[in-house]
Image (cartoon, rainbow, N blue to C red):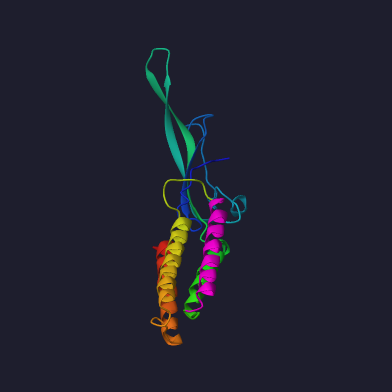
Amino acid sequence: EISQNFNVQDYPFDKEKLKIEVEFTKGDAYNQELTLDNLREIIKPNSLPNDWKVKAQEVSRSNKEQLKSSSFSSLSGAIHNGISATISVDRGTVWMFIKLFSALIISFLIAAISIFIPNHKYEPKFSLILGGLFGVIGNKYITDDLLPEVSELHLSDKLHLTTILYLLVITIITVVRACKPDDYESPIKKDFLLFAYCVLSYCLICLYFVFG
């Protein structure tokens, strides 16, 4: 087994480059000849978890000199055969992203739909926003269980913070409209434009975090 610390800031679109070096200490390069097969693969696809995919493998021979101390306190070198491999793997699965964050997106849309409710019916408007907030918090707990604790922000953290900020903006708009419902009463066309602006800007920011 080989262990390596992974950078999971972009989970589930994280990519890793593994570097593996194997040295054959029995015998030396002068008495042994190392031949690589035509496949030049060190990791089989079925040896990785289901969400990881091998994108590229580079395997080459390498000779390393190991210094040994002789009886005369001088250094003599022995060259051993070895294999050096660079393996690029990534998840790159859109389905895992949908599985993890579909509830987050639906929660935002539920809160955004409250824009269409008339201003004087502020109770159902706040109920939708509150329901969306609970959905975001629940999704945050689920995704946090899959990720290790680090000081940097994960992709998951950025998406959840963005969603909460948008819910805050929608809440402020709702409060302002509820204070003077007659003054801020608008036709369905303006409500649709406000809804479209919120959804479009939200999607653009999320796409920037995912692919930026």
Rendered location of residue 160, percent (x, y): 47, 60
Quick check: can you spot residue 102? no
* Magenta residues, start to end: 120-146
Rendered location of residue 136, percent (x, y): 52, 61
Magenta stretch encompasses residue 38: no
Seen from the viewer's position, the closer of residues 183 and 14 is 183
Is residue 129 depicted above or below 81 in this figure?
below
Does residue 72 appear to the left or right of 50 in the view shown? left
Is residue 196 depicted above or below 45 in this figure?
below
Magenta stretch encompasses residue 128: yes
Residue at the right extreme, as displayed: 46
Determine the residue positioned at 48% across, 57% down.
156
Rendered location of residue 102, percent (x, y): 55, 66
Determine the residue positioned at 45% across, 66% down.
167
Seen from the viewer's position, the closer of residues 126 and 6 is 126
Determine the residue positioned at 48% across, 38% down.
82
Seen from the viewer's position, the closer of residues 89 and 103 is 103
